[in-house]
Amino acid sequence: MSEHAVTLTVNGVAHARTIEGRVNLADFLRHTLGLTGTHVGCEHGVCGACTVLVDGRSVRACLMFAVQADGRAVTTVEGLAAADGGLDPLQAAFREHHGLQCGFCTPGMLMTLTEFLRENKTPSAAQVREAIGGNLCRCTGYAGIIAAALAAARRIAADGA
Amino acid sequence: MKPQAFAYHAPRGLNEAIALLARLDNAKLLAGGQSLVAMMNFRVVAPDAIVDLNGVAGLDGIAVGGERLRIGAMTRQRDIEVSPLIARHAPLFAAALAHVGHRQTRNRGTIGGSLAHADPAAELPAICAVHDAVVELAGPRGTRRVEARDFCTDFMTTAAAPEEIVTAIEMALPPRGHGFGFAEFARRHGDFALAGAAALVVLGAGGMVDRAAVVLFGVAHAPLRLAQAEEALRGRALTRAGILAAAAAARAITPIGDMHASADFRRHLVEVLLARALRDAALRIGVDVGGGA
Ligand code: FES
Ligand code: FES
């Protein structure tokens, strides 16, 4: 067994902990830091529920050891809303367009689409489908999620203009 | 599940990584981890030590120089997919990468890791093989190079010795204006392919095929260059009949059969996929052989 000192920021807040090498980033966020917004579905990289951003890029937190996040900036679903709890445009669009039912896949969907919409300001429905290809949803049938992502893109473009 | 406990090592330099690998018992190199960590979570693989290459300086990056392309082993698949250098010189990589897992896995997964893992259904070892790339290895006795087409030697087995590390792939730049095609069949986009094919075609004088390279994957324990198909294309014009005849060379192979697809189904699939890859390659160099090939 090996224990390692890890220093990282999560949603802009610095954390320093000592952890075992085998602890994955999702478990570290949930159990060590108490940030349970990141969900764990399959633990082998298939469902996408655990998706977080590491230095701005979407990754599967179940396929990365927390020690590997040393020195990095992690963003989780808890980091999307404003300090006063106001939803960000993507979250608001999910609510308006029924982008979720049980909500289990939602954190992963939001983080995946956060990265995607940052790179693609005017996406097509086909591009959104492709972007969430690595995120499974057992409830919605995806239609609401795609509508939400397209609406969020329009909203972000309008706000930015 | 959770992986079994292991000792974690994060070397900063290549020599340190090589020394660790030589010294430690039952050690595994960790590149992008998109296959290895999943297997560790399943406890299909249970190394006593992990040597993490993510902090090793100088193993990533894409460079073109002296008519050669070099891709560092730790270059992320996503960075290759969107690289302007790749788009200009070797766009087949980008076409294939669109089928490799998903964006989240491509953000972590590396080309070196994909080669070293050597899954028979993996796209990147096949793309390296069809480009006549060489795989650069570094070990305690220095560096050596292995042809990419000889690198995967068996099911998830490579020519790399246990104490060697894949450091880069390198290849001659394909000629400007070459045609390329890629086609695979998976149950869902991003899943492991049941079978796939890729092709590179260069036209010479009079519109005759000067060079043709063809690879199949997912059908054998390693990527398979199909010499008979390449031979059938060379020296001839690209036609629908010629492409179908070349693809028919795939009928002679003996594919693997498993619970996902029988050998017969795979043999049928690669013939169809190879014809599609060749048709797309032709189309990209302005030869429309008609649909449905
Ligand atoms: S829990 Fe990570 S991909 Fe399913
Ligand atoms: S809302 Fe239930 S899994 Fe997607």
Image (cartoon, coloured by chain):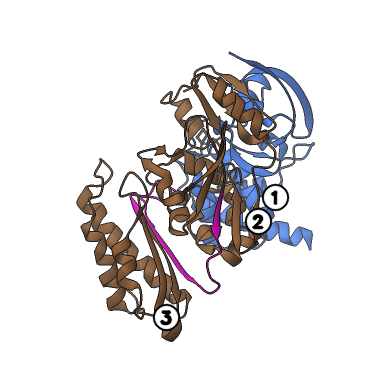
| Residue located at (70% from left, 58% from top) | A155
Structural crowding at the residue carrying mark 2, measured as other residues with C-alpha within 10 Å and reported as few (<14), some (14–19) or many (≥20): few
What number of labels is visible?
Answer: 3
Chain ID for label 3? B
Percent coordinates x, y for residue A14 in the rendering: 79, 28
Q: Which chain comes out brown in the rendered image?
A: B
- Is residue A108 placed above or below B50 in the rendered structure? below
Percent coordinates x, y for residue B73 in the rendering: 58, 44
The residue wearing badge 2 is B63
Q: Nearer the viewer, residue B17 or A44?
A: B17
> Which mark is first along the chain, 2 or 3?
2
**Mark number displayed over residue B287:** 3
> From where the camera sits, is residue B68 visible?
yes
Considering the numbered disc 2 on the image, is that residue within a helix, a strand or a loop? strand
Chain A, which colour? blue
The residue wearing badge 1 is A89
Residue B181 among magenta residues: yes
